[in-house]
Image: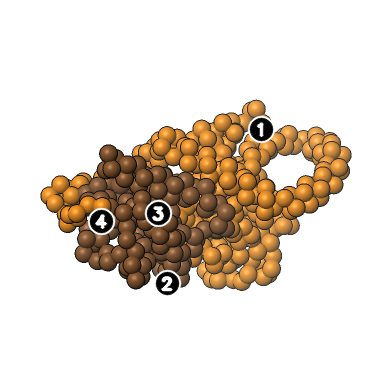
Amino acid sequence: MVSERFASRWDTLAFVACVGLALMARALPEPAQEGVSSGVRRTLLAPFLFVEQQTGRLRAAYAQADGFLAERDSAALRAIGTAGLEEENRRLRELLELDRRLEAGAVAATVLRQVTPTRGLAVVLSKGARDGVRALAPVVTPNGLLGIVRSVDPRTSVAVLWTHPDFRVSAMTPDGSVFGLVQPRGGDPDMMTMLLVGVPYRDTIPPGTPLLTSGFGGVYPRGIPIGTVTRMLDEQAGLARTYIVRAAAHPGSASHVIVLIRRDPEVSAFGPESLP
Amino acid sequence: MNGRRDRLRRGAVLLLLVLLHFGLRPWLGTGRAAPDFLLLALLVYAIGTRPGKAAVAGFLIGLLSDAVRPVAFGSAMLAYTVVGYLAAWGKAVFFAENPVVAAAFFFGGVVVRDVLVLVWGGGLSGGGLAWQLVFWTPLQGLATAIVGLAVLYVFRRWLGVRLTG
């Protein structure tokens, strides 16, 4: 224990220097911030993130073992008929002269925990470039779309969740008749609500209608559940309607996620160059 | 020799807290109310050091926190720096080696950290911000205070702390 703890000139200088560095870090452009973060994750934090990843896996193994077995069994049953469907689909696409369907793979990742507030906007995932994760890869849970990968390190990656103000995804109703753009509503992520904007005024969506990704833009595959329409929020007369959507995937409760990756050799993952 | 041994002991406690942060938190569910072991390590360190060193330690812990919190980079550095400095400075004034005061010390650290992160970093607004500050932050502060008291009690000799009352 130190006997004298009141601040000396050195203490004040150290404090001011640290505050100054923090302010500078806050003002850095986003790529530079990501560079620093990535460097820290790859060096100082690497052993601790490894510990967290392993304990997360251990926890999942203990807590969800029965659930995993049940899901595996049901998935295996569904997979029995998949080969025939794939072949049938391939023939039909050939008949319709459609391009070959892009093949998607998946990487299971652990969400690394954070302690400070704003944790509901973005997360660090335990898988990175070495596992095949690329920027702009969709992140999903068994319930639906959770977010998108923003940046990738060799062993970890950063995913922006649907609660982040920058998040956007093109959505459609299951019958493909109505399209719109889904964006976060803001406020508390626990409210689990998004907005569906840009729905043509001539179209109406009844409450309870599920929304799926439309596949427009080439980033998200078609058909991933996004949420369910709860009610209409606003309408611009003669132009468009806005709906409130209850999200399918909870940003705070996901401990394990699936990162979708493309395995088509002609397309370099979900990088910007693959966008139309 | 004793000084070196004391430093090693205190370093071991701090390392244990850091390991608990990464090794135990995955077992604590979503973790919004789970104790913040990193902040606890900073506050325990601040108890026995000068404000300048505590500020530097806070800055480094903030850097680690910002690296795994990809929103509002720099806000955790600022928050932990301020918390570290204030904790080491305020310890000389307020810390009465009384369990209640020590608990308030840990609780206050969480509150100050969260307020600074939210004000400086943004990310939450309206009802979300209010809910965080009124419900989750006090809950996490309480959990951190309880664990902090346990750490002080278990390692009181290594940390050179006397808990009375």
Q: Which residue type does callout 4 highlight?
A: Ala
Mark 1, residue position: A263
**Chain letter of the orange region:** A
Marks 1 and 2 close (CB-CB < 8 Å)? no
A52 on left or right of B157: right
Q: Which residue type does callout 2 highlight?
A: Val
**Chain letter of the brown region:** B
Mark 2, residue position: B134
Answer with mark 3 or mark 4, whichever residue precedes in sequence: 4
* Foreground of the two, B126 or B148: B148
Q: Nearer the viewer, mark 4 or mark 2?
A: 4
Q: Which residue type does callout 3 highlight?
A: Phe
Marks 2 and 3 close (CB-CB < 8 Å)? no
Q: Nearer the viewer, mark 1 or mark 4?
A: 4
Q: Nearer the viewer, mark 1 or mark 2?
A: 2
Q: Nearer the viewer, mark 2 or mark 3?
A: 3
Is disc 3 in the same subunit as disc 1?
Answer: no
- The Cα atoms of the two marked residues, 1 and 2, are separated by 47 Å
Mark 4, residue position: B88
- Residue at 82% over, 44% down: A76
